[in-house]
Image (cartoon, grey):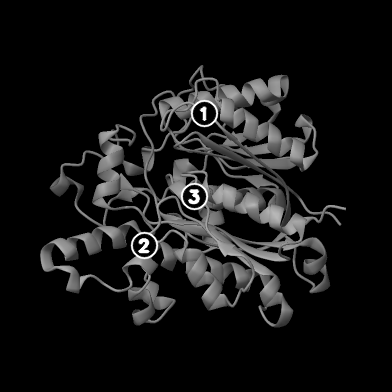
Amino acid sequence: MTKRAVITGMGTVNPVGLSVTETWDNLLAGVSGIAPIQAFDPGKWGIQAKIAGEVDGFDPTEYMEKKEARRLDRFSQLALVAAEQAVQDAGLELSGDCRYETGTVIASGVGGLATTLDQQVSLLEQGGRRVSPFTVPMLMPNAASGIVSIKLGAFGPCFSTASACASSADAIGVALDMIRLGRARVVITGGSEATILPLAVASFDRAQALCRNFNDEPEKASRPFDRDRSGFVLAEGAAVLILEEEEHAKTRGARILAELVGYGAGADGYHLTAPEPSGRGAGVAMRAAIRDAGVDLHEVSYINAHGTSTQLNDKVESRVINELFGEVTANIPVSSTKSMTGHLAGAAGALEALVCTKVVETGWAPPTINYDTPDPECELDTIPWNARQVRNGVALSNSFGFGGHSSCLAFRRYSA
């Protein structure tokens, strides 16, 4: 009999909150975390997009010693804090045999980009003797998983996944398979990204992928499914879930938040950056997740869309949802929390998995803000502006990434 995987704890630091409670309250209230970039001056670099979703008020030294913080890239710092929150939320004690049965799978689409850029400058300006000996351990994409495993004492399988903006959704999907196969009884899983840096922002800006129209009104910039959407808003942050085998959770008396019941992945096989026009990979992923969950289309009660606020993504995703669900589509609320958080890239899927967990736990779904003008090519119930109660059913979370990667996770309210 296949083992069931449940979620027993969560943690996050992101543009709308430094905890799960703060994040959830702000999402339900429609609060935007998008603001003018503080990390650097975009004008100095000739960058036209001047806004982002930064983790405001995050000081790593409030969570760790200064020496340790200096030896961790920002993406690892964010991941470690989110993971520690999640373990505490789960009431999980990693001791005895539990340590050896606990895995760590934390994704990043890019890894330690800040470290890479800083150390390249040191090399060019001051020579090899000024390059930090910690450079590689700081920049490697698996550094977040490594430091979480070390600090929390998790000795089971430990690695990272990378599939661009689907990275952390895939990490959670892999964690689900690990629980089902008995390779771990607990998995600390999620994603982290920290790329609010001149090179990353300039690259997306040059590709005309970022919103430039609302530099003076940043809270209005991310407009998923709205007719006047003009690009995504880059963001940073981390989210981590504690995924646990049901019997293990019940034996230790854990509070169970939700059940992860399905995972599906697919590939466009089309283009490195543009989605395949029919949404081939997205359709494969969504159908696979629903099939894996063993549910009927009518049981889907909420979808957290990838919903980036770009013309192509939102149109293609809407087409896939409508084609997959047919007449049922009208009865399924679909929102994009990227309208408030911006796009956390490799960490987006993890944060949105957290959102879906809260949706099935509480029965409330967050809105899509900035949805003012319907687009006839995006015919969906987008939960515009105001949070809404949704029926008890299955929540899906979509994540798509450069390279044609598509992933979908399915969540359900837990019942014994």
Location of mark 2 (residue): 139
Q: Is residue 19 above or below residue 331?
A: below
Disc 1 packing (10 Å; few <14; some 14–19; many ≥20): few
Mark 3–mark 1 Cα distance, whole angstroms, equals 17 Å
At horizontal 70% and vertical 57% (from top left) the residue drawn is 178
Residue closer to the observer: 201 or 253: 201
**In the image, what residue type sits under mark 3?**
Ala
Quadrant occupied by the C terminus: bottom right
The percent position of residue 223, horizontal first and vertical second, equals 43, 34
Residue closer to the observer: 28 or 170: 170
**Whether label 3 touches label 1, CB < 8 Å:** no
Mark 3–mark 2 Cα distance, whole angstroms, equals 14 Å
- Residue furthest to the left: 125
The percent position of residue 107, horizontal first and vertical second, equals 51, 55
Mark 2–mark 1 Cα distance, whole angstroms, equals 29 Å
In the rendered view, does 119 fall on the left or right side of 371? left
Can you see residue 267?
Answer: yes
Residue closer to the observer: 357 or 128: 128
Sequence-wise, the earlier of marks 2 and 1 is 2
The percent position of residue 342, horizontal first and vertical second, equals 42, 45
Location of mark 1 (residue): 269
Q: Is residue 369 above or below residue 191?
A: above
Sequence-wise, the earlier of marks 3 and 2 is 2
Location of mark 3 (residue): 162
Residue 241: quarter of image: bottom right
SS at badge 3: loop
SS at badge 1: loop
In the rendered view, does 80 fall on the left or right side of 263? left
**In the image, what residue type sits under mark 2?**
Leu
Sequence-wise, the earlier of marks 3 and 1 is 3
In the rendered view, does 275 fall on the left or right side of 261? left
At horizontal 18% and vertical 64% (from top left) the residue drawn is 123
